[in-house]
Amino acid sequence: MISGAPVGYGAGAVSGRRGGRKVAPRTLAPRVVRDRAELRALLGSRELYAKRPLALELPGLSAQEAFAWSERLNGLRNECGCSLGAKCMAAGFLAALAALAVLHGPFTPALLLRLPLAAVAAVVCAGLGKAAGILMARRRLRREIASLASNVPDPTEED
């Protein structure tokens, strides 16, 4: 755990009831990245998208900078795409509704009978938007990690 990090640092705290008894919250221990090689290795591993949060202890970064980078990277790792999915759902519904109104006239029985098509279009657009949101977050995560890795001094390099 990063020193100076707030209590409860680490995504994945779970609490609740099991079998009628209270269950203590669990937090996943963070995956600590200590050098440039570990950071670059993370790019090619499945651990990049694991539930364990990342904690950075990189040379050349203060504790505050490391915490800020960790939060940024963990936020991108946990992106679910819901925001873009919701926007795409609304846009898909409105576009389908407008198309149906143009084809069948506004406020007609033909439009009302085909209104479920607009709902189907909204669900399809929501799924596509969610997938696009996740893909964009993963692409940005990889760019951020590559940028951070290029700015971190390598202890094996001699001046």
Image (cartoon, rainbow, N blue to C red):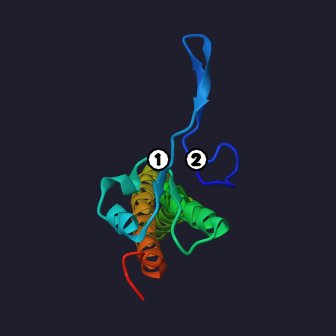
Q: Which residue is mark 2?
A: 10
Residue type highlighted by circle 2: Gly
Q: Earlier in the sequence, mark 2 or mark 1?
A: 2
- Visible in this render: residue 98? yes
Tag 1's secondary structure?
Answer: loop
Query: Are dots 2 and 1 in contact, CB under 8 Å?
Result: yes
Left or right relative to 109: residue 68? right
> Could you tell me which quadrant the C terminus lies in?
bottom left
Q: Which mark is residue 52?
A: 1
Q: Which mark is residue 77?
A: none
Tag 2's secondary structure?
Answer: loop
Q: Nearer the viewer, residue 145 or 133?
A: 145
Number of numbered callouts drawn:
2
**Picture coordinates of residue 91, whole percent (x, y):** 52, 66
Q: Nearer the viewer, residue 128 or 100?
A: 128
Q: In the orientation shown, which residue stands out farthest toward the bottom?
A: 159
Q: In the orientation shown, which residue stands out farthest toward the front?
A: 158
Q: Is residue 114 above or below residue 151?
A: above
Q: Nearer the viewer, residue 107 or 34?
A: 34
- x 44%, y 71%: residue: 145
- Visible in this render: residue 108? no
Q: Give me the C-alpha separation between circle 2 and circle 1.
A: 8 Å
Residue type highlighted by circle 1: Arg
Left or right relative to 102: residue 107? right
